[in-house]
Image: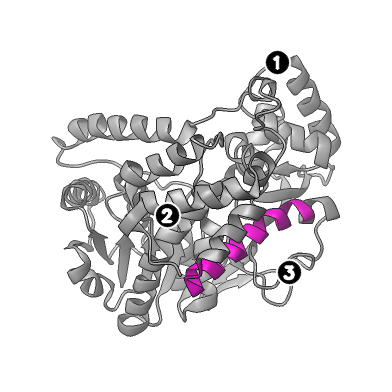
């Protein structure tokens, strides 16, 4: 069996996901193929994973493939392809995504999922992933593509609609959502045996139901405690607790993310909201700088070790691969096309996040039905941007980039239509060759 990791220079993530696979008996004898276009980062990942492999008495093998010219070889005969690329990196592209909008007074927190930053990230990433898909159709047509790259809904939605590759999008937020919520509210005693239903879109999926092991609805107590917590003073999850109060439901992804997915919290006319809801503007650039420095220090400490121990993480990838290989079923939260109306009140060509069964036949999404109308409406404001950005990527018509930015909730709440079009033009010019040619 062969497991190929695209973007293996994402060393921490490659270590976690492939280390998990090496811990899994059904996967441990695989070829672990590392692919990247950055030779330094690829060597770092190969060294760390080799030490993990030794620490686990690994029976498989690790191979490395550098550069576009070796991409088909990395993919050839793969059974699973894991994607964790970042096109354009922190420098120059992430900086561009933040600094150009700032000139128009548009501030962001993360800018990797929605917002004008998410749109630009999708437009420069989709062509690369489309190349991956074409190669996969040629050299490993039966492989499963497990996408971890953001913006999840736009990238996974494109692959699922415009290629023949079997794909599912994976995020970290579903499996930690209720655990983090209950711990934050002092309800740890309700964790064991809890039952939950989560569905919506990536980074804005909703905790629709949550019960304790005896079937007691936990939402009344959750809402009471969350409202008290927000009233008591600043903390790190104020936006999602405000969702609970105003919309009636909790959301999967963090408050720093969700602060920029709507027109409510980051507003030039109401600057006091930034402090009131503890919103970390420019959070992602700070995080990138800290991660780069942190990894350099960690690598210096690890590289002298001949073996490194690894314990299996909560990331879905190894569990999905294990279920497909062994036929032993598991349930995940997966990003899939809304074909047949898995969520009835969202478009069928949207990429939605719903419970999925995984077994020897692959990934099987489950039908959720209708979301509460206010939740579907919130999702739809984001889906509008997803679909228009995908349309821009598929047709290379610049007009659809304007449309996506015009309908992006935070952007539209802050800027005029003329400024939106001008900002898009400036971003396209600033990104240069990182973007395809739009008509």
Q: Is residue 304 visible?
A: yes
Report the Cα–Cα distance between label 3 and label 1.
39 Å
Residue 212 locus on image (x, y percent): 77, 42
Indicate whether 84 appears above or below 338.
Answer: above
Residue at image position (63%, 38%) is 179
Circle 1 residue? 233
Disc 1: CA contacts within 10 A as few (<14), some (14-19) or many (>=20): few
Question: Tag 2 or tag 1, which sits nearer the N-term?
Answer: 1
Residue 43 locus on image (x, y percent): 16, 50
Q: Which mark is residue 428?
A: 2
Element marked by disc 3: loop
The magenta stretch is 377-397
Give the total of numbered labels.
Answer: 3
425 relative to 181 in the view: left or right: left
92 relative to 144 in the view: left or right: left
Element marked by disc 2: helix
């Amino acid at each position: 069996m062969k497991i190929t990791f695209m973007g293996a220079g994402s060393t921490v993530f490659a270590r976690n996901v492939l280390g998990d696979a090496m811990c899994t008996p059904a996967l441990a004898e695989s070829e672990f193929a590392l692919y990247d276009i950055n030779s330094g980062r690829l060597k770092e990942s190969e060294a760390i994973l080799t030490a993990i492999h030794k620490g686990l008495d690994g029976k498989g093998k690790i191979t490395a493939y550098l550069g576009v010219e070796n991409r088909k070889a990395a993919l050839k005969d793969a059974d699973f392809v894991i994607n964790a690329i970042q096109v354009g990196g922190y420098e120059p592209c992430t900086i561009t995504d933040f600094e150009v909008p700032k000139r128009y007074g548009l501030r962001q927190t993360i800018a990797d999922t929605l917002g004008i930053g998410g749109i630009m990230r999708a437009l420069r990433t989709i062509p690369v992933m489309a190349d991956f898909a074409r190669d996969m159709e040629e050299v490993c047509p039966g492989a499963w593509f497990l996408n971890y790259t953001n913006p999840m809904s736009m990238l996974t939605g494109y692959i699922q609609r415009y290629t023949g590759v079997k794909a599912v999008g994976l995020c970290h937020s579903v499996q930690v959502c209720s655990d983090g919520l209950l711990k934050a509210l002092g309800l740890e005693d309700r964790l064991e045996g809890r039952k939950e239903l989560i569905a919506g879109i990536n980074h804005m999926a909703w905790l629709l139901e949550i019960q304790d092991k005896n079937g007691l609805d936990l939402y009344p107590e959750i809402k009471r405690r969350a409202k008290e917590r927000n009233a008591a003073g600043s903390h790190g999850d104020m936006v999602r607790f405000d969702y609970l109060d105003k919309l009636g439901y909790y959301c999967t992804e963090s408050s720093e993310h969700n602060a920029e997915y709507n027109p409510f919290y980051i507003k030039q006319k109401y600057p006091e909201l930034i402090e009131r809801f503890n919103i970390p503007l420019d959070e992602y650039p700070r995080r990138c700088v800290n991660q780069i420095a942190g990894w350099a220090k960690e690598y210096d400490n690890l590289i002298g070790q001949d073996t490194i121990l690894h314990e299996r993480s909560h990331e879905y990838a190894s569990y999905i691969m294990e279920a497909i290989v062994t036929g032993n079923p598991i349930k995940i939260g997966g990003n899939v096309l809304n074909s047949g109306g898995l969520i009835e009140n969202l478009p069928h060509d949207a990429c939605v996040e719903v419970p999925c069964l995984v077994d020897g036949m692959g990934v099987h999404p489950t039908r959720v039905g209708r979301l509460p109308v206010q939740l579907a409406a919130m999702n739809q404001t984001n889906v509008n941007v997803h679909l228009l950005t995908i349309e821009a990527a598929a047709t290379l018509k610049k007009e659809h980039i304007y449309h996506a930015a015009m309908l992006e909730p935070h952007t539209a709440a802050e800027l005029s239509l003329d400024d939106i079009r001008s900002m898009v033009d400036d971003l396209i010019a600033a990104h240069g060759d990182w973007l395809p040619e739009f008509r």
